[in-house]
Image (cartoon, rainbow, N blue to C red):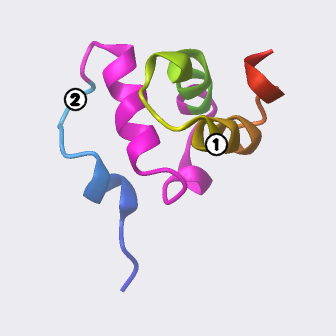
Amino acid sequence: MELDLKHLTWDYAGLPGDDTWRARRLAEFFPFVAERLTAEERELLLRELDRINLPDERKEFIRLVCRGEKNGK
């Protein structure tokens, strides 16, 4: 039986309107959801990453996986 990570980590029927909140949810379950992120979700995560309270090392990892640039540049 394959686990549906999107279903397990995203327990809302619709998307909340706050982009930072949505990005925070994705970051909380990173890297478990990394393979299934859409291009739009990766873009959202990279755009909102500096507003999320995470260790710098984890932010850097998310940037690398989402093909962002190093150190937010």
Quadrant of the rendering where the N terminus is positioned: bottom left
Q: Residue 25, image x and y in percent? A: 35, 37
Q: Is residue 35 magenta?
A: yes
Residue at 50% across / 50% down in the picture?
A: 30
Residue 46 in the figure: left or right of residue 68 = left
Mark sitting earlier along the chain (2/1): 2
* Residue neighbourhood size for the residue with mark 1, other residues' Cα within 10 Å, grouped as few (<14), some (14–19), many (≥20): few
Q: Position of residue 63 (x, y in %)?
A: 70, 34
Q: Is residue 14 left or right of residue 37?
A: left
Quarter the C terminus occupies: top right
Q: Label 2's element?
A: loop
Secondary structure found at label 1: helix
Residue under label 1, please give it: 57
Distance between the alpha carbons at the discs numbered 2 and 1: 31 Å
Label 2: which residue?
14
Q: Residue flagged by tag 2: what amino acid is it? A: Gly
Which label number is shown at residue 40? none
- Residue 61 pos. (x, y %): 68, 45
Residue range highlighted in magenta: 16-41
